[in-house]
Image (spheres, coloured by chain):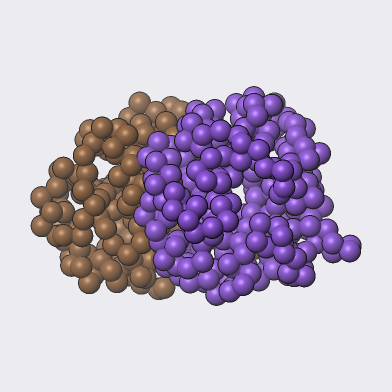
Chain colours: A brown, B purple
Amino acid sequence: MIAIVQYNAGNTGSVQNALTRLGYESIITDDTDTICSADKVILPGVGQARAAMQQLQQKGIADIIPTLTQPVLGICLGLQLLCKSSSEGRINCLGIFDCAVKRFPTGQIVPHTGWNTLEEMKGLLFSSIERLKPDVYFVHSYYAQPCSATVAICNYILPFSAALQKDNFYATQFHPEKSSGIGEIILKNFLTL
Amino acid sequence: MLKKRIIPCLDIKNGRTVKGVNFLQLRDAGDPVKLAEEYTRQGADELAFLDISATTEQRKTLIPLVEHIARRINIPFTVGGGINSVEDAANLIRAGADKISINSAAVRRPDLITEIASRFGSQCVVVALDIRLTKGQWEVYIDGGTKNTGYNAMHWSMQAERLGAGELLLTSMGHDGTKNGFALEITEQIAGLVSIPVIASGGAGNTIHFQELFEKTNASAALAAGIFHFRELSIYELKIFLKDKQIPIR
């Protein structure tokens, strides 16, 4: 069973729809036991980092995520919450990835909204598509700086981490569940880990 | 490189897709679920869905229809029409909408923009403006284009951004359904004023209109309906044309 973590205002429905289309059963849950015993865990997210972190802390989920040993996928805000800190609300996050999340500089069009190109892809998330330069769907105002865990880069105003991976933790700044066929390949790569 | 988006729009009334001219003379344009699937196949970058039903009774069909479409498409999905509260927005997001488009309700109560943005994030809030050149000034109309607010389109755009809008959807009523091209000047003026993405809508009649929009303005996306519904142009053909003209297109 795949657990989709429910907190605050994530787009859990969209993620579940995508898994269903791919033929995977999932459960949307905030129950820590269910999350711990799931085969895979997805931490989706839209919304604000501070409010989301508070929700994760109140529900006791913030404590268990770093202890999980099964594959975990953070999406969009989910990626940012797995980083060390976020300048959105000046908060400490879960600290899986050793990089900081910052806001795109002002004076440019923000949020970064639309389809943009993945580069320098590596690792299991991008199996079979490493050699392509696919476009995937982004919508975000904050970004994770490139770091040792970066497994894909995207350029918008500046280069940022489009995907991160460390041990059993995977994360995408883009929305694979909204990125058409290429997104489905990436999700499937995660689901078959 | 960030690509320019092509967004087909389904105007929905009583569960069917409709399309008019200058917001009037509505005619049936087919089953919204079938159109949504077809546009996704053709390479649409996003799908917009605007409920233009006038009554609460007619609106009851909305949530199941949104759920139905959301289950079938794998691209971003924007839903608008009759959203008056954070609760309305929450229900649609739960049903599978990725973004919420608000129009008249935001003009009547601008705080609604901030309320939805602070719960779901600015990236979730599209503020739609129906505008018309009225006595030399671009003014904002509400209630499906039936009521002139007298608000200046540029001022309202900037205010919407300040209040937390993540995107603006600009529809020129005078161009809507005419197939004479987008309202380039006002689109460029507003895109130059705000630092959030601007979606241009109204007037698309051929491939060159899209080319002009992306070459002459800073619009991030083009939204069109009739030209796609009535099979005058497929999204696939349009994208091949624009790529050939060196416009960044997925």
* Residue A99 screen position, x and y as percent: 36, 59
Seen from the viewer's position, the closer of residues B27 and B217 is B27
Seen from the viewer's position, the closer of residues B147 and B167 is B147
Q: Residue at x 59, y 45 (%)?
A: B11
Q: Residue at x 61, y 72 (%)?
A: B108
Q: Residue at x 53, y 71 (%)?
A: B112
Q: Is residue B97 above or below residue A132?
A: below
**Which corner quadrant of the image does residue B224 belong to?**
top right
* Residue B101 screen position, x and y as percent: 55, 57
Asked whether residue A82 appears in the rendered view, the answer is: yes
* Residue B152 screen position, x and y as percent: 77, 68
* Residue B154 horizontal side relative to residue B229, left or right: right
Q: Is residue B230 above or below residue A120?
A: above
**Which corner quadrant of the image does residue B90 belong to?**
bottom left
Q: Residue at x 18, y 67 (%)?
A: A60
Q: Is residue B118 above or below residue B51?
A: below
Q: Is residue B246 above or below residue B106?
A: above
* Residue B36 horizontal side relative to residue B161, left or right: left
Which residue in the rendered view is the most extreme toward the right?
A: B136
Seen from the viewer's position, the closer of residues B164 and B54 is B54
